[in-house]
Image: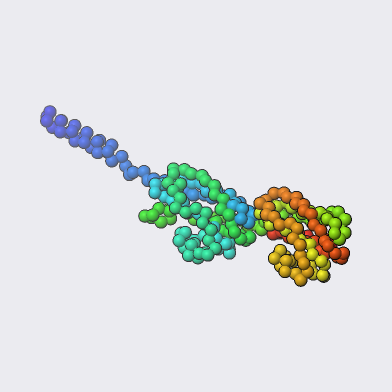
């Protein structure tokens, strides 16, 4: 009886050990998650803040692309998006290993070159599996540079042979090329390009030529005309034009 009892006890322990070892099915790892925040509007060539966040997994990479928006949705995988928009594609980030982190949140500010809406698409990929999260998407409408102020004034006696001042003031949030010139009036208004203005039949005197990186500017230079008559002074900028006789 003792031998039988010992065998039963051993069998029972073995059964309990097997149950503890098995422990039921293994818990599956959580799938990567991905979300993205895109501002509704942005200025041309000024990178809009595009924020991506989520949870990743080992050997995963983040890819974010921006393409001109035509009403379509993001492609299921980034390679297809690249093929569809090869020439106008803007790479926000690619092969970025932040998606390997347990959790991540990063902001990218890619300059968008054209004044038009852009579709921004994001995916998480693994080399062996392809896309494991996404696409997520957002649309940002890009506006041309904004010029809040652009003025031209002349001060002083407009008398042949005597100097007078030419002033240009500007306020802009982007780079602006500013020029001011003066020439005999001929019925033609000021041109939209300084090089064209220089090619007018009348002699053009360039008074101001400067690059404004952004912000406010007040430029003043001295000019002089040698002969009596009617003159046209012109100021040109990337988004503004003023003329004064």
Residue 116: image location, x then y, percent = 62, 61
The answer to whether one can see residue 31 in this image is: no
Where on the picture, by quarter, is residue 24?
Answer: top left
The answer to whether one can see residue 21 in this image is: yes
Residue 187: image location, x then y, percent = 82, 70
| Residue sitting nearer the eye, 81 or 55 | 81
Describe residue 154's horizontal placement relative to residue 67 as left or right.
right
The answer to whether residue 203 is above or below residue 95 is: below
| Residue sitting nearer the eye, 181 or 87 | 181
Residue 220: image location, x then y, percent = 77, 52
Q: How is the image coloured?
A: rainbow
Residue 2: image location, x then y, percent = 12, 28
Image point 39% across, 46% down: which residue? 58
Quadrant in which the N terminus is drawn: top left
Describe residue 22's horizontal placement relative to residue 81 as left or right.
left
* Labels in figure, total: 0
| Residue sitting nearer the eye, 138 or 84 | 84
Quadrant in which the C terminus is drawn: bottom right
Q: Residue furthest top?
A: 2
Image point 28% across, 41% down: which residue? 22
Image point 49% across, 62% down: which residue? 81
Describe residue 77's horizontal placement relative to residue 194 as left or right.
left
Image point 56% across, 58% down: which residue? 119
């Amino acid at each position: 009886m003792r031998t039988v009892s010992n065998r039963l006890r051993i069998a029972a322990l073995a059964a309990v050990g097997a149950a503890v070892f098995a422990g039921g099915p293994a818990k599956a790892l959580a799938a990567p998650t991905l979300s993205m925040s895109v501002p509704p509007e942005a200025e041309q060539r000024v990178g809009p803040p595009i924020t991506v966040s989520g949870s990743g997994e080992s050997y995963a990479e983040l890819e974010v692309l921006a393409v001109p928006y035509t009403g379509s949705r993001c492609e299921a995988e980034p390679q297809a998006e690249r093929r569809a928009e090869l020439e106008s594609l803007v790479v926000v980030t690619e092969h970025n290993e932040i998606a390997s982190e347990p959790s991540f949140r990063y902001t990218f500010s890619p300059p968008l070159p054209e004044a038009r809406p852009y579709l921004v698409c994001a995916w998480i990929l693994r080399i062996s599996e392809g896309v494991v999260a996404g696409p997520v998407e957002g649309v940002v409408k890009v506006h041309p540079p904004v010029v809040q102020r652009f003025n031209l004034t002349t001060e002083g006696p407009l008398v042949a042979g005597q100097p007078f001042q030419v002033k240009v003031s500007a306020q802009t949030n982007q780079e602006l090329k500013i020029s001011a010139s003066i020439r005999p009036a001929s019925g033609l208004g000021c041109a939209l390009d300084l090089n064209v203005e220089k090619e007018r039949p009348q002699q053009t005197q360039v008074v101001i030529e400067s690059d404004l990186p952004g912000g406010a500017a007040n430029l003043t230079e001295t000019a002089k005309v040698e002969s009596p008559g009617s003159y046209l002074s012109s100021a040109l900028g990337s988004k503004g034009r003023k003329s004064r006789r």
